[in-house]
Image (tube, rainbow, N blue to C red):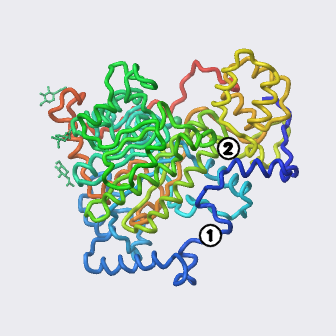
Amino acid sequence: MSEPLLNSNPTSRSSAEDEQDYSEDISLDNSWVPNEKRPSCMRRYRKWIITGCTATVLSVIGIAIAMSFSGNSVKDVIEEGTNKDSSQSWVYNQQPTRFLSKSSSQKPKNVIMMISDGLGPASVSFARTYYQYTQNQPYDYEMPLDKIHVGQSRTRSSSTLVTDSAAGATAFSCNMKTYNGAVGVGPKKNPCGTVLESAKHAQGMLTGLVATSRITHATPASFSAHVQDRDNENAIARQQIGDNPLGRSVDLMFGGGYCHFLPKSEKGGCRSDSRHLLDEATSKYNWTTVMYNSKEAFEALPSDESILPAISLFSSDHMEYEIDRNPQTQPSLTEMSKKALDVLYKATENKEKGFFLMIEGSRIDMAAHSNDAATHVHEILEYQNTIELVKKYVDEHPDTIMISTSDHETGGLSLARQVAKAYPEYLWYPDVLTKVKSSTIKLEGLINQQSTLTRDFIVDIVLKDHLGITDATEKEIRQLMKKSNLDKYLAEMVSIRAQLGWATHGHSGVDVNLYAYGSGSEYLIGSHENTQVGEFITKILDLNLTEVTTRLNLDNPSFHINNLTEKGKLEYNEELQHYHHVPSNLKHQEL
Ligand SMILES: *[C@@H]1O[C@H](CO)[C@@H](O)[C@H](O)[C@H]1NC(C)=O
Ligand SMILES: *[C@@H]1O[C@H](CO)[C@@H](O)[C@H](O)[C@H]1NC(C)=O
Ligand SMILES: *[C@@H]1O[C@H](CO)[C@@H](O)[C@H](O)[C@H]1NC(C)=O
Ligand SMILES: [Zn+2]
């Protein structure tokens, strides 16, 4: 890129027009947004008698008392195991011993597994800085995730050094490294039992999936279905409603993607086999609540057991990006998660068995695929908003652990960019992003809708009104008039002005952050393989994935592909080519 240095002048950022922009950009309904720095409960210990810490403190005391009788602590549960041969040995042998002495955790009844698809460490810093800037917070202001950071997750798949979301989620759900594209199947393509399935069938827990992508997309699918290729979403939908060897494993699904549940003859449907899975869900698989495209009906649902099992899907494809979302028609990730938690809590309140809930901020990844920095930041902030909600839930229900991590990083984001030959200044410009009103993929659609595209439309509507760009070069405008590769080109125009770098439109292989809060979270401190996150859930909930794997593979000739030995299922592909550079047909041109 030989663009001139496209400086954004930070001193101009306090104009009245800009102030207005900021308040519109970050909607102030972020419930976790405090007006002042809010110290954590622990840090407020001096005042704990008169603050909200009281409840937490009382429950900790309660747990300690309960434990002295039952001895049912996480420490006991984890150390109870004597089986040292398996890959779970880290749980026994590598516990953070410095925390054991004060471990007072109760064995959790509920697990909330949160996945920020495509959120790498640079993106965490990126969104924090943006938030501090737009909300006028000090440089040491911490986001909800910052307060519960415990370690890293190493993300490679069995087939390559850079995983995709399917292998990434299957590592969490089946505790197994598998090949890119694999949804709930191992390296030999046989179904592997998931933590969700085992929680449901072995433990009688309630289970839920919340995602902003199609609910049939790789991450939620890897907990609830088994296909060799993630693109087989029609099969995933079928399995999710209960048409699989285990029957129905999911009790609640909120998200996007009714496309794969409806025949092509229905509006928004895309099944060619003419099955209407939403009708079948009610008539054959005993789902109580089945609705789509209705935020109103969703909001009217009572928050209790009576609605379960429940499906509510809000879009044929993925749900809208947070930056584009119409709150009249689609709920936010936080709203869906709140409903899910309210329902699952009520349904398990007086029962011995709790719930397993997977919540995915699905589209953090997709915005990074476009290198669309502003859309990426709004997806992350909404995820942080959901984290705050779930943290509050854990505070109020100490029998719960929440885990949050990413399947991989997306985009190769760097918070610096050399935009000219001259040695770069050390900076990047958050203010550029505050002026962006729409995702670049939406703007691409808007441009493509114009039967005759005018220069004025590009300059005044797309660039000025939607992206806040008033210094476009002739070359840039000419390129946009060509209507080619608009999404990525527009995103690039914003990133170069903000001086943000992107290495790829795909994923990268860096370790991602691991977060945990609640009972037993101290066992996740440190650097872990992604598979160990699943092992931890398995251990802490007393699950047995082998049992489910066996049920999935035996006596189901139409479902399984090959008969595998126990060893075969865990066989690791050691014939990696990816350590060696091979001559490529790709031209290493600058994109
Ligand atoms: C649905 O409920 C009916 C009546 O309780 C029961 O007979 C049937 O087995 C259930 N079907 C499934 C798939 O669970
Ligand atoms: C898990 O289930 C399998 C198959 O039913 C059984 O052989 C195994 O002993 C179980 N493992 C544990 C730890 O209970
Ligand atoms: C799997 O094993 C069963 C029982 O041993 C056998 O009947 C079946 O043919 C085998 N299937 C395959 C694909 O090898
Ligand atoms: Zn991705």
Q: Which mark is residue 414?
A: 2
Mark 1 surroundings within 10 Å by alpha-carbon count, few (fewer than 14), some (14 through 19), many (20 or more): few
Instruction: Tell me: 427 left or right of 556.
Output: right
Residue shown at 30% from the left, 60% from the top: 348
**Along the line of sight, which residue is nearer the eye, 253 or 244?**
253
Instruction: Tell me: 562 left or right of 158.
Output: left
Find residue 271 and report its image quarter. top left
Find residue 91 and report its image quarter. bottom left
Quarter occupied by the C terminus = top right
Instruction: Tell me: 18 left or right of 30.
Output: right
* Residue 419, placed above or below residue 198: above
SS of the residue at dot 1? loop
Q: Residue 117: x and y, percent?
A: 51, 43
Find residue 443 and report its image quarter. top right
The amino acid sitting under disc 2 is Ser
Disc with the residue nearer the chain's start (2 vs 1): 1
Quarter occupied by the N terminus = top right
Q: Residue 501: x and y, percent?
A: 70, 39
SS of the residue at dot 2? strand
Distance, label 2 to label 1, CA atoms, is: 29 Å
Q: Residue 551: x and y, percent?
A: 19, 40
The amino acid sitting under disc 1 is Arg
Q: In which quadrant of this rendering is ligand 1 seen?
A: top left
* Residue 448, placed above or below residue 69: above
Residue shown at 64% from the left, 25% from the top: 445
**Along the line of sight, which residue is nearer the eye, 509 or 300?**
300
**Along the line of sight, which residue is nearer the eye, 20 or 358?**
20
Q: Residue 147: x and y, percent?
A: 56, 64
Q: Which mark is residue 272?
A: none
Q: Which mark is residue 38?
A: 1
